[in-house]
Amino acid sequence: ICAATKLYYIQMEKPLLEEVMLKRSQQKRKMSRVNYKERIFVLTKTQLLYYNNKNGKKGAKKGVVEIQKIKCVEIVNLDEPTPVERQYPIQIVYDEVILYLFAKDEQSRTRWLNALKYEIRNNQNLAQKYHCGFWKHGKWLCCKQTTKSAPCCTFENMGSKYRSSLPLPPLPGQQRKHIQLPDIPGQEKASLKMVEALYSYDGKGKTEITVMKGKKYFDKEGGFIVRESNQGNGYVVSVFTKALEDKKGTIRHYHINLTEEKKYFLAEDHLFDTIPELIKYHQHNSGGLVTRLRQPVTIKTNKVPVSFDGEWELKRKDIKLLKELGSGQFGVVQLGMWKQKYNVAIKMIKEGSMSEDEFLEEAEIMMKLKHPNLVQLYGVCTKEYPIYIVTEFMSNGCLLSYLKSDGKTLNQFQFVEMCYDITDAMTYLEDLQFIHRDLAARNCLVDKTLTVKVSDFGMARYVLDDQYTSSTGTKFPVKWSSPEIISFSKFSSKSDVWAFGVLMWEIFTLGKMPYDLFNGCEVVQKILSGYRLYRPQLASDEIYCIMSSCWKEASMKLVADAVCCREKSSN
């Protein structure tokens, strides 16, 4: 983890651009004079730094601008005669301050503008307007206003290069926004707690709630409200999260932006015709927000989370717990007897490991799925604690454990049949626009007839456009992750295909750990540099060809067809 963290900071601080440019003094004091000095500017993914220029070498550091604080990057119009060395100005607006710098030529200015705009494209505080002229002689040269804090006069335009209706996940090899490394194992999510409102807010209309100062409310991850902006210029989405450094949680505010074409968007410029459509999308996909919009905030509080009732709510008295089958960081699975005749698996959460609503999200997903190669949900018990998720019992247990203990008794046809079982399930999920996000041998189960079924839908997501951007701090298994997950936290059906290729490798190595000679940090470097898993001894060239296609641009349907053909030829 230390090595991985070190790699992360190296990537963040690696210079993207470095050049000598002229800088204008920022005149933070009213009586200070305007002057221009040569500085060496260095752009990284987190900062813009500038240094004294000592014969082309960096001297003392003179200033730094945090990338996340930048509100606007634009050119400045020349409204009066200007010396040759100041013909190509750039303005950088941050913290109510403007940094003016001057490139040596148009090519240099374009290069810096593009690089800076790319790095700030997901900033939450981007300005919609700016002053296109200099502040000089006590006035704005563009609009002639004499107050430095006067309203801006020109609409900011990030341009089509930085905005698209439905952007696809970036491809490997493109400039990486950041490397998202998994959290340190062992960190647990906080249990659901009460919070006290510090201020009162009078909700306006049916879409907002009224919050009273001093009243207590549940601090649910992803709780959100849509409210009118305090400035009266549209609407704001306020969302609660514990994904950041503040363990007590924090509230992030996102202005709902409107394009000239009357399209709405939040952080990553997914465009929508209406605000309800925008909210629906971000309920399934964080899309640049700190977390998904999981649930609208209400003042209703139940002792037990929402009950499913109807056909899914089982009677607890009909279930008898027999023995523990396994346990993990967040939950325990027990073998049980339902109605005195059906063996079932019962999943329960460990106290304090996660909220009950998060736990039941998996059951809500399973209710929408029914396929012979997906572990079947029988029901839930939500009327009292502990909450149960009840599923079919798979007598041969986890596929990974089965491969290690009994894999040597299997033949080639059985290996291929296992692969086909999984592709059949994953093709079904893809057709329903679900992404599993955690496909691996450890998350598949084997029944008494050796049929393999995909399980563990805790990370599964329904997607509207075949992509899912994970929230800040989301954990993911590096050794099963595609380059775009490692680099951008972008999940799609293609990333599930990648994980299936690794799962095939697990099957044909009888449960061996992928990249077993490398640690997590080294795996990241290997994957991003193009290294791929070798051909297992038990896999034929034809099987390895199918496996390798998963690590390219293959769809699950094509892979399933290839495995099906191989299964028929093996039979």
Image (cartoon, rainbow, N blue to C red):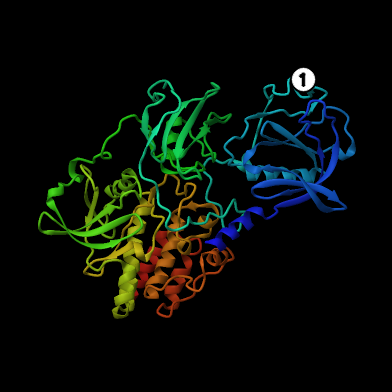
Quarter of image, res 395: bottom left
Q: Is residue 105 left or right of residue 163?
A: right
Q: Position of residue 457 (x, y in %)?
A: 34, 53
Residue 564 vertical position relative to residue 208 in the rendered view, above or below: below
Instruction: Say which residue appears at 57% left-offset and 65% top-offset.
Output: 525
Residue 266 vertical position relative to residue 355 in the rendered view, above or below: above
Residue 5 vertical position relative to residue 294 in the rendered view, above or below: below
Q: Is residue 52 left or right of residue 431?
A: right
Q: Is residue 499 left or right of residue 305?
A: right
Question: Could one spot residue 367 in this view of the protein?
Answer: yes
Residue 185 vertical position relative to residue 69 in the rendered view, above or below: below
Label 1 residue SS = loop
Query: Residue tagged by mark 1?
Result: 144
Q: Position of residue 454 (x, y in %)?
A: 32, 60
Q: Amino acid at mark 1?
A: Lys
Quarter of image, res 34: top right
Question: Could one spot residue 571 in this view of the protein?
Answer: no
